[in-house]
Amino acid sequence: MILRSLSFLLILFLLLGGIYCSALPEVGRDIKAAARSGDTSAQVALARMYFEGTFGGHDPVMSARWLLAAVDQGDPDAMNILGRFYLSGVGVERDEARGLALLREAADMNQPQAQAYMAYAYGEGLGVERDSVEFLRWTRRAAENGDARSRYNLAVLYLTGSLVSQDVPAGRALLELSADQGFTEAQVALGELMIRNVDQPSDLVEACKWFAIARTKGHPRAEKRLHQIVGFMTQAEMDEAGRRANAWLQANEAGR
């Protein structure tokens, strides 16, 4: 398989952490009130707060309860997260069938992370029979809906000609999208593609930029590639690559 999922607890933290709200007491009161009134976005946000211990301690059970309230109203984001709770037994009794059913329902509603999980499930045979056609179908759907990991996975398929006809420009375009979303593996792969002179002339400055960005996240291959590439660059080129990398990092930090 192209890329295995992170551990479930890390995924759950990232999913819940993506729905950010302030931990100030008055904000917590407002969110609780909105959640009790039936606001699904508030219910998911409140689930995050209980999961992260905003109210004094990590409480996955209360987190699951508020996710269930949102699921009962048909919220696909809540289905995606609660499905993973059931798969890993976080806050609820482990129930793989229930978890997969929730993820499939969310995926059918175009929730991109759930679609990415369905691709993973069909690729690995987790709760379903391995099926390369379904793996590709769900990978495509998740990529079309903006999932960075799926865009990277689909890019690799296009670049290698696995399951699809080889299409380097399409693979490059997907890598660019995924890298700009901050997916580190895509950043390194894009840099490597840019120095290979495959479908376009090599671009050492842009490749160096992506290696430098990925290195800030501790990616070992990025560090290696960066050391290799600078030996072929002028000081002016290295300065420009550094300027571009810093601009990208600052823009993405500001956008968080």
Image (tube, rainbow, N blue to C red):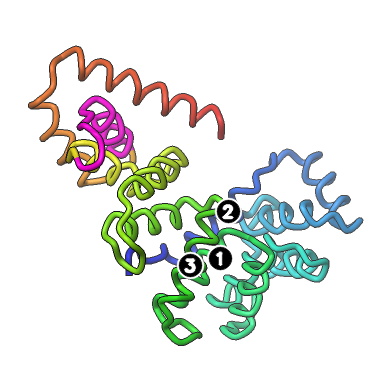
User: Does 212 appear in magenta?
Assistant: yes
Crowd tier of the residue under label 3, counting other residues whose Cα lies within 10 Å: few below 14, some 14–19, many 20 or above? some
The quarter of the picture where residue 207 lies is: top left
Callout 2, which amino acid?
Asn
The x, y position of residue 229, in whole percent, is: 14, 32
Element marked by disc 2 = loop
**Which of 79/157 is in front?**
157
Give the labeled residue for mark 1: 115
**Which of 212/197 is in front?**
197
The x, y position of residue 216, in whole percent, is: 32, 36
Horizontal side of residue 41 vs 200, given as left or right: right
Q: Residue at 60% of width from left, 85% of height from top? A: 97
Element marked by disc 1 = helix
Instruction: Magenta stretch: give its range.
Output: 198-216
**Quadrant in which the N terminus is drawn:** bottom left
Give the labeled residue for mark 3: 8
Q: Residue at 51% of width from left, 53% of height from top? A: 147
Crowd tier of the residue under label 2, counting other residues whose Cα lies within 10 Å: few below 14, some 14–19, many 20 or above? some
Label 1 with label 3: CB-CB less than 8 Å: no
Q: Which mark is residue 145?
A: 2
Label 1 with label 2: CB-CB less than 8 Å: yes
